[in-house]
């Protein structure tokens, strides 16, 4: 079993670099050593410690931030186009067994008994104005229970998100922003709980999930049309059951981006290169120096021109 020396930095608070999705995945095939002097470093979006590492840098983002190849050699991102340096691997893969979403659903009568409430939202970001505006509009029909830190109207933050979601017919699944390919856990968590998502975000979501299985904003084109559809489903159990019974994936098969073997093929290509300052790192420094030189001479040129005016 090949030994790989890795480290993690600039991940979100609470991230355990010794026990996480990537370590668990890699241990199936490698002897993994997490250490301070690695040959490969995984880094994310919360900080700049990755700049201290003189080794192969692998960027992973849970946010809608495109890879910066001046800072990373390879990327695991939301970008829709794969390449020899990037692989599309959306955040939702870290939130459960995606294959289970292709399995048989619980009988509707069983789930419907647990749906004692209308709609919920769990949110802490006060800057996502599209989501906030829609929340207030839908509240004009019926109260949307907000269990997060922001917009909370149930007396305090919830302790168990999935248990909370499972009590509701509908769940707000709005992303923070629209970005092609940017799909997070917000869509799949209610799927795991038997609650129908109300989704807004990735304009290409139909390439990955069956939009007949949830309320997809882009299929209706306006807040008013979406709310009209929600009211229709809320008041007609037959229509609601029809949507509930739709498979989550087209052809009821997990999409391409759920395939862990696909990710492993990409990572093998990185780990089986010679351990040295590779071509990508050299190119990154060359590019960085090139732009520094352009900026310097551009500023110098402007100063010379100004002196003759």
Image: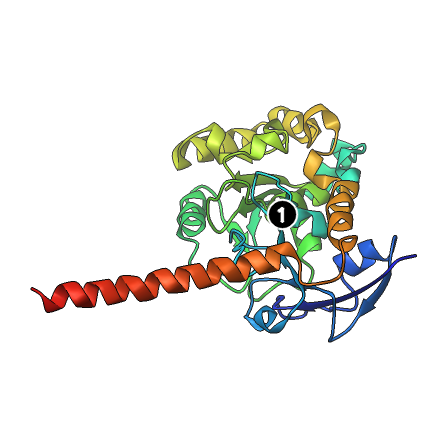
Judged left or right of residue 257, residue 65 is left
In the foreground, 73 or 25: 73
In the foreground, 34 or 57: 57
Which residue sits at x=60%, y=27%? 212
Judged left or right of residue 84, residue 232 is left
Which residue sits at x=61%, y=43%? 187
Q: Around disc 1, counting alpha carbons within 10 Å, would you say few (fewer than 14), some (14 to 19), or many (20 or more)?
A: some
Q: Quadrant of residue 158?
A: bottom right
In the foreground, 40 or 249: 40
Q: Position of residue 200 (x, y in %)?
A: 50, 41
Q: Secondary structure at mark 1?
A: loop
Q: Residue furthest left?
A: 309
Which residue sits at x=63%, y=55%? 279
Q: Quadrant of residue 79?
A: top right
Above or below — where is 79 with respect to 26? above
Q: Position of residue 15 (x, y in %)?
A: 69, 67
Give the labeled residue for mark 1: 85
Judged left or right of residue 48, residue 136 is left
Residue 266 shows in the view = yes
In the foreground, 16 or 199: 16
Q: Position of residue 45 (x, y in %)?
A: 56, 63
Residue 147 shows in the view = no
Q: How many marks?
A: 1
Which residue sits at x=43%, y=45%? 134
Q: Position of residue 182 (x, y in %)?
A: 55, 45
Q: Residue furthest bottom?
A: 36
């Amino acid at each position: 079993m090949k030994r790989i020396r890795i480290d993690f930095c600039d991940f979100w608070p609470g991230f355990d670099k010794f026990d996480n999705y990537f370590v668990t995945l890699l241990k199936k095939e490698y002897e993994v050593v997490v250490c301070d002097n690695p040959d490969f470093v995984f880094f994310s979006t919360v900080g700049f410690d990755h700049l201290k590492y003189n080794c192969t840098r692998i960027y992973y983002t849970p946010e809608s931030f495109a890879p910066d190849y001046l800072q990373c050699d390879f990327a695991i991102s939301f970008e829709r186009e794969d390449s020899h340096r990037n692989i599309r691997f959306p955040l939702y893969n870290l939130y459960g067994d995606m294959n289970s979403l292709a399995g048989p659903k619980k009988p509707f009568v069983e789930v419907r008994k647990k749906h004692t409430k209308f709609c919920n939202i769990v949110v802490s970001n006060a800057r996502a104005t599209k989501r906030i505006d829609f929340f207030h509009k839908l509240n004009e029909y019926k109260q949307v229970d907000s269990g997060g830190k922001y917009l909370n109207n149930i007396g305090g933050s919830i302790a168990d998100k999935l248990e909370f979601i499972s009590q509701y017919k509908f769940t707000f699944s709005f992303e923070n922003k629209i970005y092609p390919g940017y799909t997070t856990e917000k869509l799949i968590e209610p799927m795991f709980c038997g609650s129908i998502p109300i989704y807004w975000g990735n304009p290409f979501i139909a390439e990955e999930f069956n939009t007949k299985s949830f309320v997809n904003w882009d299929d209706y084109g306006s807040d008013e049309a979406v709310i009209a559809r929600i009211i229709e489903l809320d008041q007609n159990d037959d229509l609601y059951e029809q949507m509930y019974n739709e498979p989550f994936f087209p052809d009821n098969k997990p999409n391409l981006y759920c395939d862990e073997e696909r990710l492993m093929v990409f990572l093998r290509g990185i780990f089986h290169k010679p351990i040295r300052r590779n071509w990508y790192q050299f190119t990154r420094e060359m590019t960085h120096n090139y732009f520094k030189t352009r900026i310097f001479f551009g500023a110098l040129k402007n100063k010379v021109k100004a002196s003759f005016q």
